[in-house]
């Protein structure tokens, strides 16, 4: 083979300027670093309560059919979702988790230099996609540990933003707005601006926090997932819904055969098992109460939560919170913390089984004592 | 809610210009149209022989853990693949099927107006990605039902192409080049041009058709999949390998948490079961022989194949081939055909079980008789 022209082909200028990065380090990577498995996995807001037994059965039943590509239209799942939402099947699109759907939506709407508005400390994977398509991020602060619609709107208006990102309920703070606040925000969107309403945690929200569904409005795309309440983070199924023509945009760019056949079957079975979600909701509520009690017993302050996690104010700065987090990790408890100020005075703990929370209850005082001693 | 500003936000100019399309209509959509299931599913080059029993066990064993996100580094699978390929783990990246990896690679290397060279009639999903990122496709004809390295190189040189796409063995023709021809092509790549070598069917290729692995060369990215020989099309696991820095590019844009946990476990089990792939290879070879015999018995000409399908020359123009295909579909046999001339004088039939091919043997003469009668 000649070796005269072995120069590396150049990426696009946009790609050359991007860092090789990962929005989150996975718990498995931490386990490999530590050389030991976590005793409690409470860091990724997964549902430790698992998928429903019916869903496990559906996965096993479909395993033998894994040789077949999944239906690229996700027809059955899409129709079931549309039925549950009270909308038409072409007003919803199924994708490989909200992460993939956020990527598609950003790709459709954001080109180099286009402005996107989000909150400082909100979902990093969304920011990753915006940067990845050359968009320019404008971040506004959380106010009282909530994303602030007025600040988001003002920034969008000032900068002519293409997209606003808002999670309701919010991750990583667990806070929420009521439906009226979201509806008022929508009514006040500047022209040409699309609201990306991330509702990953919607199944845990109080009823009053969820706006009614109005798919006649082309300025809002809402996203939900099977990764949280349904316990299927490992299957990669999310969905977006909104006005027909906006949803149709996904058909221009999405990976049509990207949806696993087994995952489609799992999600369909999950959707049919409403009792399981009720059960999970109750267990999450109990776990939130317990996490709050553990925090208070240790002089820490749990924040109110409309999600499957509790964000705990450690009462000092980010270094202190980071030290608590590191201490918990070295005690074998996987937790995470908000990335940005002022949220990064907190740690974030996902709902766990009783034995997970027993471990937490044991570890936190130990960690705090060691920190004082250190 | 105010309705004064309900205008649809605009997509990017690039996205506005894209059609809502799908590279392939799925068999499920055809079944819904026909109102009846296919009796034989021989159109998507899936492996009717299924995944190995060990893999089915692995899927069921992991189902209960589906509440956990998959390892974003696909560490275990990536290391196992690297071991099998004799390369380092950071010289391979795992993705949601070759389709997703092609999309990522195009995104990294192709911007608006950049030229990409492929063969007229080669993989449409690759073309979809190129169009989706604003690339300009230059297509050269197949010669003797094979993709032609010399034409591809000449076009790449003439147009200053960023990428060349070549599948070896080829889909949809089933043809192949020997390793020497591919190596000579690589040696002759114009500067700045990256060869995307799609090896989806590599497990079915004669040994002499597969170039040795040289990940020191940054001008070639090779892609392989668990969708064909391993019988896992429905799980969405592909991988790309090549020079470390080129592979590192994927980390800038890929959906890190996009890999299903259950799919990672399935692929890992599949990779460990070499005997199953041997078994599938033998059954594919027997099926190819049988499909060839059926074709010949009906006055049609099977083309040589290094894949898990046989492309059959129907001996007349595309209308004739289309009529044969439509006839088979209405007999309940899902098959496809090449999209472009001169391949579209053919139909393409995936390897099937004996009973699938019995149905084929029954249907073809019936279809041909009906066509003559019509």
Image: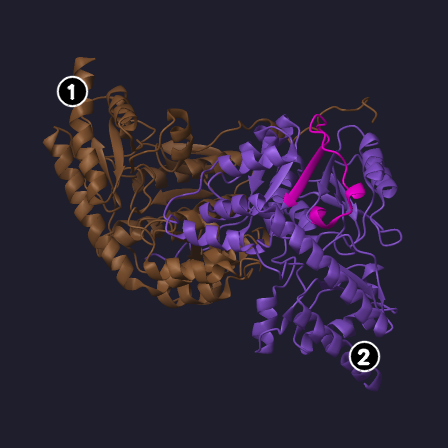
Chain colours: A purple, B brown
Q: What's the mark number on residue A286?
A: none
Is residue A209 part of the magenta span, yes or no? Answer: yes
Frontmost residue, B112 versus A235: A235
Residue B257's image quarter? bottom right
Chain under disc 1: B
* Nearest to the observer: residue B122 or residue A69: A69
Task: Look at the numbered discs 2 and 1 and tell me whether their residues touch, using CB distance below 8 Å.
Answer: no
Q: Quadrant of the C terminus of chain A?
A: bottom right
Q: Residue at x 62, y 60 (%)?
A: A49
x and y percentages locating residue A154 in the rendered image: 87, 38
> What residue would you read off at disc 2?
A368
Where does the image place residue A257, in percent across and percent down from the top left? 46, 41
In the picture of the structure, the residue carrying the numbered disc 1 is B369
Where residue B68 sits, quadrant-wise, is: bottom right
**Vertically, is B158 above or below B196?**
above
Q: Write down the region rendered in magenta.
A: A201-224
Distance between mark 2 and mark 1 Cα atoms: 84 Å
Q: Residue furthest bottom?
A: A373
Q: Residues within 10 Å of mark 2 (few under 14, many from 20)?
A: some
How many marks overall?
2
Is A178 located above or below residue A365 in the figure? above
Residue A172 position within the rendered picture, expressed as x and y whole percent measured from the top left: 75, 56
Quarter of the rendering occupied by the N terminus of chain A: bottom left
Q: Chain of mark 2?
A: A
Q: Is residue B222 visible?
A: yes
> Which residue is depicted at the point 20% across and 27% down?
B314
Between B184 and B144, the one lying in front of the other is B144
| Residue A347 appears in the picture as rendered | no
Up-down relation of residue A7 to residue B318 (above or below): below
Please name the residue shown 69% across and 75% down the image: A359
Q: Tag 1, which secondary structure?
A: helix
Residue B219 placement, left or right of A212: left
């Amino acid at each position: 083979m000649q070796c005269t022209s072995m120069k590396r082909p150049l990426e696009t200028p946009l790609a050359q300027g991007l860092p090789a990065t990962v929005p989150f380090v996975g718990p498995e990577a931490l386990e490999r670093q530590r050389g030991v498995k976590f005793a409690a996995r409470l860091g990724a807001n997964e549902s430790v309560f698992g998928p429903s037994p019916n869903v496990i059965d559906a996965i096993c039943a479909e395993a033998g059919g894994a040789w077949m590509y999944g239906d690229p239209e996700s027809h059955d799942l899409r129709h079931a979702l549309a039925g549950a939402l009270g909308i038409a099947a072409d007003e919803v699109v199924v994708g490989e988790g909200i992460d993939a759907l956020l990527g598609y939506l950003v790709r459709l709407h954001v080109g180099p230099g286009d402005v996107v508005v989000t909150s400082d400390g909100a979902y990093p994977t969304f920011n990753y996609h915006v940067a990845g398509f050359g968009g320019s991020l404008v971040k506004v602060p959380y106010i009282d540990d909530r994303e602030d619609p007025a600040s988001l709107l003002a920034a969008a208006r000032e900068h002519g933003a293409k997209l606003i990102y808002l999670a309701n309920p919010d991750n990583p703070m667990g806070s929420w707005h009521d439906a009226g606040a979201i509806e008022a925000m929508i009514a006040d969107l500047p022209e040409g601006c699309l609201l990306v309403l991330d509702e990953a945690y919607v199944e845990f929200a109080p009823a009053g926090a969820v706006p009614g569904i109005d798919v006649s409005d082309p300025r809002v795309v809402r996203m939900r997932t099977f990764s949280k309440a349904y316990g299927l983070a490992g299957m990669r199924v999310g969905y977006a819904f909104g006005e027909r023509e906006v949803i149709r945009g996904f058909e221009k760019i999405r990976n049509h055969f990207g949806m696993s056949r087994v995952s489609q079957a799992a999600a369909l079975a999950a959707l049919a098992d409403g009792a399981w979600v009720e059960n999970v909701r109750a267990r999450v509520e109990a776990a939130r109460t317990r996490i709050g009690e553990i925090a208070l017993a240790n002089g820490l302050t749990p924040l109110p939560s409309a999600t499957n996690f509790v964000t705990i104010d450690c009462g000092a700065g980010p270094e202190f919170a980071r030290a608590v987090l590191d201490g918990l990790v070295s005690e074998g408890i996987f937790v995470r913390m908000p990335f940005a100020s002022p949220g990064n005075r907190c740690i974030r703990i996902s709902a766990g089984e009783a034995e997970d929370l027993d471990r937490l209850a044991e570890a936190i005082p130990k960690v705090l004592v060691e920190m004082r001693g250190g």
